[in-house]
Image (cartoon, rainbow, N blue to C red):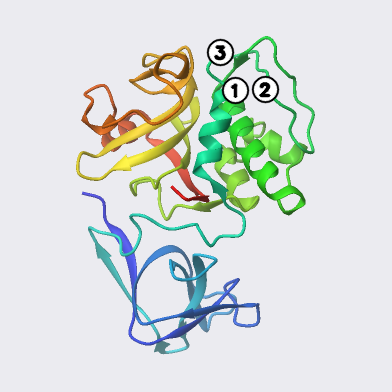
Amino acid sequence: MDTYRVARLPARLRGFALPDTSTQPGGYVEAGDYLVLEEKSRHPTPDTDYARLLVPKLSALDTWVCTRWRTQRYATFLSQESAPAMARLSFDSEPLAVLEERLFTLLGAFPDYRYDGSRAYYPWALPGVRVQLAPPRLNNCCTFVEGLLVKAFSEAHGAAFSWDARRHRQMMIASTQDYFSPVTAAVESGIALLAPSEDVPPHPWTLIQGWHSQWGSGHTFLVVDFHEETDKVLVLESNAAYGLDGVGYRGLGNLRDVGLQVPVDWWTRSEVWTWRRLCSMYPFRRQAWLKVKAR
């Protein structure tokens, strides 16, 4: 059973953009239990500790709070089997979010694509980077995810969303300095929230970078939805395995065969993987929750 790190606040605390009270305020966090996304001990001086909390009521969704000043502590930390206020975040008030409907519409460019590990072509141009355009309609896991997400977010937000050659290299995992760079690119560009750990169940529209071994046979893919009662995950990917030859839903089939929309009652299908099975397949992984609204 997975456990979650939770901060219990006995009183209201001010949030900050960074783990430092001299930085921009990030709203107030009311008393209660909050999922811990990150911690900084003895930072920025030995006198203080900070924690970045998931706060669904804030427009930014997360904020840093000071949990200790010298001997005074402002939070109690717990480990528990369920995460407070995490199951279904709403990104509807998030400025840099995209409509789920638009993502499904853009999937219409991918049904004819076939998987090719060495050759990849995009259905459209991307801002700030030169990419090869189809035909031929061939792609791989990284180029599919980049093509779909960058098109959706750049189209929706224009100059407010920035993409460039550096971000493209991150999506292609061009450096051995960061084996989870597709997740890093999504978080740093502002289109996703880094999950508190690799083990927590994915949020609807989660970007995952997984590795079968350290660091061999990597895969970039999306989880469109998670069904808590059955532990099933609806995986959207470009692959040449698990019933796919191109873009589709793992275990269910290619988009050209099953259509663009999520199959009805997908979690009842025996072919659909569980989160536990996915974690076992990719023991080295990291995930980011994409800012998708009107789900």
Q: Which mark is residue 109?
A: 1
Measured as percent of width and height from the top left, residue 59 is found at: 53, 68
Using residue 146 as the reference point, say whether residue 211 is left or right of it.
left
Tell me which amino acid carries mark 2: Pro
Measured as percent of width and height from the top left, residue 238 is found at: 50, 21
Structural crowding at the residue carrying mark 3, measured as other residues with C-alpha within 10 Å and reported as few (<14), some (14–19) or many (≥20): some
Structural crowding at the residue carrying mark 2, measured as other residues with C-alpha within 10 Å and reported as few (<14), some (14–19) or many (≥20): many
Q: Earlier in the sequence, mark 2 or mark 1?
A: 1
- Give the structural element (helix, strand or loop) at label 2: loop
Q: Are marks 2 and 1 in contact (CB under 8 Å)?
A: yes
- Give the structural element (helix, strand or loop) at label 3: loop
Q: Earlier in the sequence, mark 2 or mark 3?
A: 3
Tell me which amino acid carries mark 1: Ala
> Is residue 142 at least partly visible in the picture?
yes
Using the numbered discs, state the Cα–Cα distance from disc 2 to disc 3 in whole angstroms.
11 Å
Q: Which mark is residue 112?
A: 3
Q: Which mark is residue 123?
A: 2
Q: Is 171 in front, or is 146?
A: 146
Tell me which amino acid carries mark 3: Asp
Using the numbered discs, state the Cα–Cα distance from disc 1 to disc 3 in whole angstroms.
8 Å
Q: Are marks 2 and 3 in contact (CB under 8 Å)?
A: no
Q: Based on the displayed image, in which of its 4 quarters is residue 278 positioned?
A: top left
